[in-house]
Image (tube, helix red, strand yellow):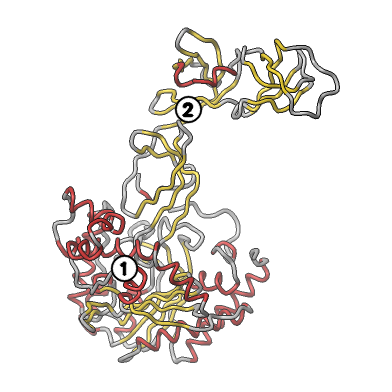
């Protein structure tokens, strides 16, 4: 399908923004708008912020700012924000995009935010005139991993355990860096850091080589929407961890629509010490890769300590990707409202 | 250079050889490593391959450039070219020019590939017009068949041409396939 005409694009964005707002207001959430320029972005291993001189960054996500509002009693909130990630350029990537992010306050809201994803997808598909996914399925990461690779993992594995589980012969392909340390040394001294890196490699390889085919098969059977749930605990990011059925998992899910990754959700981590440890570990990983360490978001960490984050679940959804999918476009550029020459890449 | 600097047309040094990125695709699973999927071409041999790099990997940029140069003269084991902007002369070893020497004429413009300040390859124009200096007499009317005959062009190279071509004709040659394309009026 060719890119919609400009007038159509303008109408689409107008209708999509209105539909999203209408949905969340109807669900009792308040809309917020937090600063785009921040002193300390969320620290992620492979997300590079764009600096905003004289000292600061363009937000890579509104997560920390929104959680500070949650700590102060905002109740359930949502936001449609502009976020920036350096050097992410591709058909499904842009350095600047719209993140739709929301939080439902309360115990056991994890399932509810997955229903939100399905409802928002349906609403935007409907206004674009395209049939939304007929069916959604939810699968735990480790079940899916076993189904697609034949390898059984529990999430507790350290680097040696992962390599043993994958088989020594296959490990070099799965974990290019971690397998190399095993042969020649040179891995991070901190075993938890090595473990984070190895699991990230595993997830990257699996997402690239095994998940797309499985998603295609689901789609062929009418399940255009998939929540990959219960991530390995090491990949918890900002989600809570737990032991469930002998597995070490994070209450984190990723939603895929028509084969495209669209949203990422958590039952939110509320433990300030644990959050600080994770930020510090990710910073160590960044430095190990030769990327600059990022300033710790101390204000956010203090708020987690006191007044504290209420029990809640949250999701971040790529709104540009959703419009792309809903219109049948194949790249973000086809639905973008950006006119003129592109801004030079960061 | 960092993998995040990868783009189409980026020049890389891999195992000592210069490569150019001819196709580039960025994908990234949620919070995973970015995958930079590239098709790369060896700038000397022209062979291509697929390579995927991940976030955090380091790459070496290749010190490589192409210069427009003019062929001046040949010595026993080298060919001398002149930079058309600076008038500097550059000797390119015979081995680098290889079979392309079959087409070199005085004052011809070529592109010279310079890698780490050494000439490593030349690129001829894809098509050249050459005069036939020697061939059997032309055969009138026989323009439709695939029958050919040998003919010498002004560099001394022998190419296969249709029977109607005669001495003194100008023909267009595809330098990549080294074959006759058509007769031209000069």
The picture places residue A127, in percent across and down from the top left corner, at 61, 81
Q: Residues within 10 Å of mark 1 (few under 14, many from 20)?
A: many
Comparing A304 with A93, the one in front is A93
> Is A195 or A21 nearer to us in this picture?
A195
Vertical placement of A100 versus A59: above or below? below
Q: Name the residue at 47% across, 25% down.
A: B121
Indicate the position of residue A197 as horizontal and vertical percent values.
Answer: 25, 61
Q: Is residue B162 left or right of residue A301?
A: right
Are discs 1 and 2 located on one and the same chain? no
At 31% across and 68% down in the image, what residue appears?
A: A42
Q: Residue at x 35, y 74 (%)?
A: A144
**Quarter where residue A337 is shown:** bottom right
Q: Report which quarter residue A131 is drawn in.
A: bottom right
Residue hosting label 1: A42
Q: Is residue A157 left or right of residue A263?
A: left
Residue at disc 1, secondary structure? loop
**Residue B103 visible in the picture:** yes
Mark in the foreground, 1 or 2: 2
Number of the label disc, if any, that sits on residue A224 = none
Could you tell whether B126 is left or right of A202 in the image?
A: right
Q: Residue B123: name its quadrant.
A: top right
Write down the residue under mark 2. Answer: B113
* A195 or B167: nearer the viewer: B167
């Amino acid at each position: 399908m060719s890119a919609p005409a400009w007038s159509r694009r303008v109408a689409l964005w107008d209708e999509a923004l209105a539909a999203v707002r209408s949905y969340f207001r109807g669900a009792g959430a308040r809309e917020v708008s937090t600063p785009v320029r921040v002193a300390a972005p969320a620290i992620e291993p492979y997300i590079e912020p764009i600096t905003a001189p004289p000292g600061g960054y363009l937000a890579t996500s509104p997560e920390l700012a929104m959680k500070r509002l949650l700590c102060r009693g905002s109740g359930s909130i949502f936001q449609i924000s502009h976020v920036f990630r350096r050097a992410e350029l591709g058909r499904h990537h842009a350095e600047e995009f719209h993140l739709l992010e929301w939080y439902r306050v309360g115990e056991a809201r994890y399932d509810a935010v997955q229903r939100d994803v399905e409802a928002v997808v349906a609403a935007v598909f409907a206004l674009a005139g395209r049939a939304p996914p007929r069916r959604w399925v939810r699968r735990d990461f480790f079940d899916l991993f076993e189904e697609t690779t034949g390898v059984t993992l529990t999430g507790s594995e350290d680097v040696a355990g992962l390599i043993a589980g994958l088989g020594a012969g296959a490990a070099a392909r799965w974990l290019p860096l971690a397998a190399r340390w095993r042969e020649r040394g040179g891995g991070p001294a901190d075993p938890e850091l090595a473990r984070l890196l190895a699991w990230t490699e595993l997830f990257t390889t699996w997402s690239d080589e095994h998940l797309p085919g499985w998603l295609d098969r689901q789609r062929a059977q009418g399940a255009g929407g998939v929540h990959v749930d219960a991530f390995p605990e090491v990949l918890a990011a900002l989600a809570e961890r737990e032991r469930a059925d002998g597995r070490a998992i994070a209450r984190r899910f990723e939603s895929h629509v028509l084969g495209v990754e669209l949203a990422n959700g958590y039952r939110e981590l509320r433990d300030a010490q644990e959050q600080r440890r994770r930020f510090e570990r990710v910073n160590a990983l960044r430095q190990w890769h030769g990327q600059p360490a990022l300033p710790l978001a101390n204000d956010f960490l203090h708020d987690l300590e006191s007044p504290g984050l209420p029990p809640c679940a949250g999701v971040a959804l790529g709104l540009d990707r959703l419009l792309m999918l809903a219109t049948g476009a194949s790249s973000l550029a086809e639905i973008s409202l950006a006119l003129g020459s592109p801004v030079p890449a960061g | 250079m960092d993998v995040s600097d990868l783009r189409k047309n980026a020049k890389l040094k891999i195992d000592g050889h210069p490569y150019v990125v001819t196709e580039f695709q960025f994908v990234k699973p949620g919070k995973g490593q970015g995958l930079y999927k590239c098709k790369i071409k060896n700038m000397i041999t022209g062979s291509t391959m697929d390579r995927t790099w991940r976030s955090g990997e380091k790459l070496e940029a290749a010190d490589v450039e192409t210069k427009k140069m003019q062929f001046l003269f040949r010595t026993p084991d080298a060919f001398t070219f002149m930079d058309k902007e600076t008038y500097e002369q550059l000797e390119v070893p015979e081995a680098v020019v290889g079979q392309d020497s079959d087409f070199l004429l005085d004052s011809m413009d070529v592109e010279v590939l310079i890698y780490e300040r050494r000439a490593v390859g030349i690129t001829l124009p894809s098509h050249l017009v050459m005069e036939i200096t020697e061939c059997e007499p032309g055969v009138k009317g026989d323009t439709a068949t695939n029958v050919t005959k040998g003919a010498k062009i002004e560099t001394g190279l022998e190419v296969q041409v249709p029977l109607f071509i005669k001495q003194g004709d100008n023909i267009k040659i595809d330098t990549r396939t080294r074959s006759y394309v058509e007769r031209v009026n000069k």
